[in-house]
Image: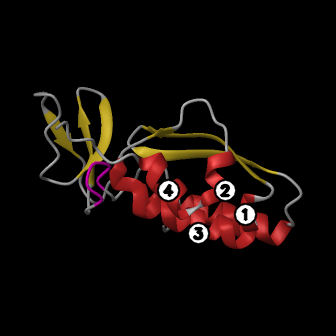
Amino acid sequence: MVRREPDLGENLTAKFAWLAEQKFAWGWDCGIGWEKILTDFLTTVEQECPGGKGFEIRQVKEKLGTVRFYFALKNVDEAAARRIYDAETLLDARSLHTCEICGERGRLRSAEGYRFVACDEHAAFEGRIVTTFGPETRYRFLGAT
């Protein structure tokens, strides 16, 4: 029997049924390790846009080590929109410290120019030399996160 890896999209759709109606070209182009932080973000979306009404996903992917969640809001009041944008900023910041493979605490790493976030166990990358950035490294965020 072939072991099937968990599918991030299926897992999230099981939690948020309205995701089944979202049509975006590339799907969930990031690792299963980010399921918890994506769930937290989508919980805020669901609170502000019940049933996903007014929330349209454009693209979800990993880029330069962190999550990029592109979306559009339609007919959403300003206060709700601000809470969603704040939750997306938190999602982005949390992805910088969450292993994309397993969801444990991770650190930003680079393997010959490819940046990713991984725990110590998952830091090896296809036999390449991996550089780990120190905790003092400022990356993408100007303020406290």
What is the distance, in whole Å, between disc 2 and disc 1 at their CAs?
A: 6 Å
Between label 3 and label 4, give the one nearer the viewer: 4
| Amino acid type, label 1 | Gly
Residue 24 image point, x, y percent: 64, 36
Say whether disc 2 or disc 4 marks the residue closer to the N-terminus: 4
The residue to which callout 1 is attached is 51
**Circle 4 residue:** 12
Foreground tag (2 vs 3): 2
| Secondary element at image label 1 | helix
Residue range (magenta): 99-103
Three-letter code for the amino acid on which mark 3 is drawn = Thr
Q: Position of residue 30 (x, y in %)?
A: 41, 42
Q: CA distance from mark 3 to mark 1?
A: 11 Å
Mark 2 = which residue?
18
Name the spot of residue 39 as percent of width and height, x first: 50, 63
Helix, strand or loop under label 4: helix
Query: Which of the two labelled residues, at mark 2 and mark 1, occupies the earlier sequence position?
Result: 2
Helix, strand or loop for disc 2: helix
Amino acid type shown at disc 2? Trp
Most common secondary structure along the magenta stretch? loop
Q: Position of residue 127 (x, y in %)?
A: 10, 28
Q: Which residue is mark 3?
A: 43
Q: Secondary structure at mark 3?
A: helix
* Residue appearing at x 45%, y 62% in the figure: 37
Work out how far the residue at label 3 is from the one at label 4, CA to CA, in angstroms.
Answer: 11 Å
In contact (CB < 8 Å): disc 2 and disc 1: yes
